[in-house]
Image: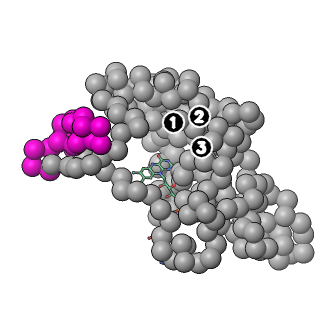
Amino acid sequence: MGVAGPHVSSAVTQLLASKEIAYHPEHQVTTVDPGGKRVTFTNGTQVDFDLLAYVPPHRAPAVIRESGLVAESGWIAVDRHTMQTRWPNVYAIGDVVSIPLTLGKPLPKAGVFAHREAEVVAENIAHTIAGGSQRARFDGHGECFIEIGGGRAGFGGGDFYAEPKPAVVLRQPSWRWHLGKVWVERSWLYKSF
Ligand SMILES: Cc1cc2nc3c(=O)[nH]c(=O)nc-3n(C[C@H](O)[C@H](O)[C@H](O)COP(=O)(O)OP(=O)(O)OC[C@H]3O[C@@H](n4cnc5c(N)ncnc54)[C@H](O)[C@@H]3O)c2cc1C
């Protein structure tokens, strides 16, 4: 959680260490040996893995890249409060946008933000159609549960738009946050299905 600053990042790293999960920041993978279950990094370091969940280089889908909407970053630039692109009444939300923050990192690509951005855009489009003003604003607040197993979860969240740096707090893992996660999950499944 680099975007949340060194304090929160270090708390997450400690969570990993407490589970004896090795952390190799700033390492680029060169090769993966699936049979030997070993990853080699550009600096020559090799680590063994039990389960590899590899994320390929992240980029917007072709339909977005070819739409003429993307900025130099490869993502769509928007007004960070209304999600409007540089074209009036054209909006973008979720993972395809990049919103720079003061720490030099962009707003994380997370479902919680995509959801809240969607609500703001939907409300503003409805107001515009009704002849009103664009009064809804996305305020950069978001949160997530950090499931650690054993019936416990941590919880991190706050104001990612806060200046001079995001005001994000990480709550210690407990069974309460785990139950909170189960409740959120069930309420979504209930509403959707
Ligand atoms: C492993 C993992 C764990 C995550 N955990 C969390 C979490 O705990 N909390 C959290 O908040 N976020 C989490 N996220 C991030 C979250 O899933 C994304 O931020 C969120 O889904 C973004 O929503 P979106 O609608 O912008 O994009 P997406 O959910 O990616 O939706 C885009 C859709 O567009 C479709 N599409 C692409 N190209 C075309 C095309 N040409 N025509 C039609 N459709 C097309 C895709 O198939 C996809 O269905 C996680 C992501 C991953 C991968």
Q: Is residue 30 above or below residue 181?
A: below
Residues tagged 1 and 2 counted as in contact (Cβ below 8 A): yes
Instruction: Please give the name of the residue rendered at 48% of the width and 24% of the height, measured from the top-left corner.
Output: 11
Left or right side of 166 for 149:
left
Colour convention: one colour
Q: For residue 15, which quarter of the picture?
A: top left
Kind of residue at badge 1: Met
Left or right side of 61 for 126:
right
Left or right side of 73 for 89:
right
Q: Does the magenta portion include 172?
A: no
Mark 2 or mark 3, whichever is nearer to me: 3
Task: Identify the residue position indicated by label 1 in the image.
Answer: 1
Instruction: Please give the name of the residue rendered at 30% of the width and 29% of the height, measured from the top-left corner.
Output: 22
Q: Earlier in the sequence, mark 3 or mark 1?
A: 1
Question: Residue 77 at x, y = what percent?
Answer: 67, 62
Q: Earlier in the sequence, mark 2 or mark 3?
A: 2
Local packing at callout 3 (Cα closer than 10 Å; few below 14, some 14-19, many 20+) is few
Local packing at callout 2 (Cα closer than 10 Å; few below 14, some 14-19, many 20+) is many
* Spatial CA span between label 2 and label 3: 10 Å
What are the residue bounds of the magenta stretch? 34-51
Kind of residue at badge 2: Ala
Instruction: Please give the name of the residue rendered at 59% of the width and 43% of the height, measured from the top-left corner.
Output: 105
Mark 3 or mark 1, whichever is nearer to me: 3
